[in-house]
Image (tube, grey):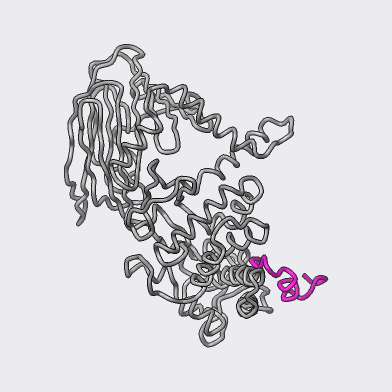
Amino acid sequence: MMPTVGVQRTDFLGTESQKRPFASAFSHEKEYAEPGYYSVFLDTYGVKAELTSTERAAMHRYTFPESKESGFILDMDYNIQQQINQVMEVEAVNDTVLRGRKRSAYWAYRQDLYFYAVFSKPFTYTLYTDTVQENDKQIPVCKMLLHFETAKDEQVLAKFSISSVDAEGAYKNLQAEMPGWNFDGVRADAKKKWNECLSKIAVKTNDEDQRAIFYTAMYHAFLSPNLFTDVDGRYLGMDLKVHTTDMKHPVYTIFSLWDTFRALHPLLTIVDPQLNTEFIRSLIKKHQEGGIFPKWDCVSNYTGTMVGYHAASLVTDFYVKGYRDFDVQEAYKACLRAAEYDTTGIVAPDWLIPYVMPKARYYKNTLGYIPCDRENESVAKALEYAYDDWCISVLADSLGDTETKEKYARFADAYEFYFDPATRFMRGLDSKGEWRTPFNPRSSNHRNDDYCEGTAWQWTWFVPHDIPGLVNLMGGRMLS
């Protein structure tokens, strides 16, 4: 949503452009940010914009100049990464309330979002919809243009809430979390909650820049996974059906496990084990609803993105550190399910199944290695599978399952197949047992070779579960 003064421009600039015709110039000198609050002065319109939030709702405050042509543009068709807008609906409930929904598809195949918005000032409106032809594509356009007059320095507020369940969920979220118009109070509450979160680690230093860098990084670390449960306990499950949970155990989404298993979740075992418990509980629900642990779920969509099945790392790390306030047996069952090749029972479109359950897991369990001529990113998958299988073997050992422990301990040694003693790098091995050529350890063709977002120089070292074994492959402690 963009505040405007004067003519509201809605020209179509093409799908390749991330710029909008109503975008405003701004200066970082007139911008301010802290956890729970953001403000910027929009030079094009002479408007100061301020934002704050609760868990499920946001409050906007805009300070306008005097004008008979003030307003907002609510841009329903804006997206990133060229997503496809499948549904765009917005309606004026009355002269201060909007509600609507949007469904888009791309990286996540069905993203549903409902919103409910209340404005402090009555408006008139123009609903602008169109279909624009670009090459052989028809691009739907949907924008709500709001109009009103403002006096000098008049503040206009707006409250937005969202839900992935339905419009009623968005309405309830707003009523529960933001019934009034106390912007400064909401901001103060947000600041207090963030301070409680960030104060879990105390930094002693006289270098204020280093302090700011540390807490900025910690703030970023706590941005996701995201709360995905409405105030009435309803949420959208991995089966894309509405479920209800006990509000003591809310459900979360945006588990980018390939990014977070290495450091974020181990950090949470130290600074916020209760939150990490809820994350693991959420992952177990996703396994039950969708048929398998997600590698990376986005608003209850399997995406099949990245490699590994790192929920096994989260569960094992948490369990061996003594945190067990979750269904351990169900989590163990889910870890084993993710490690075995089985495409049945997964709730996802047919085209997505090979990404959610790649055949690489069949090869590593039957052939003992993943042939690079049969599976993309074979080395990256193999090394991460070996680590995750080691995690499963540790969990099995802790639970007294000796047979499974030994089986997965053998799988954990599979990293050795990919080590080429001549070059001393991990390399792609084809179905004939030959190294892929040509080979350049400094080169990688993004998402289309034996590695995943890295090169042999980076991936060769990913044997965190058996560093002595890697040292031996390198020629021993003295040589390596």
**Identity of the residue drawn at 46% across and 26% down:** 186
Whole-percent x, y for residue 217 in the image: 60, 41
The residue furthest right is 478
Whole-percent x, y for residue 278 in the image: 53, 51
* Residue 415 visible from this viewpoint: no
Whole-percent x, y for residue 127 in the image: 18, 35
**Identity of the residue drawn at 25% across and 36% down:** 99
Whole-percent x, y for residue 476 in the image: 79, 74
Figure quadrant of residue 47 = top left
Q: Where does the magenta region start and end? A: 460-480
448 over 20 or under it: above or below? below
Q: Is residue 462 magenta?
A: yes
Left or right relative to 17: residue 316: right
31 over 350 or under it: above or below? above
SS assignment for the magenta stretch, majority: loop
Q: Is residue 45 magenta?
A: no
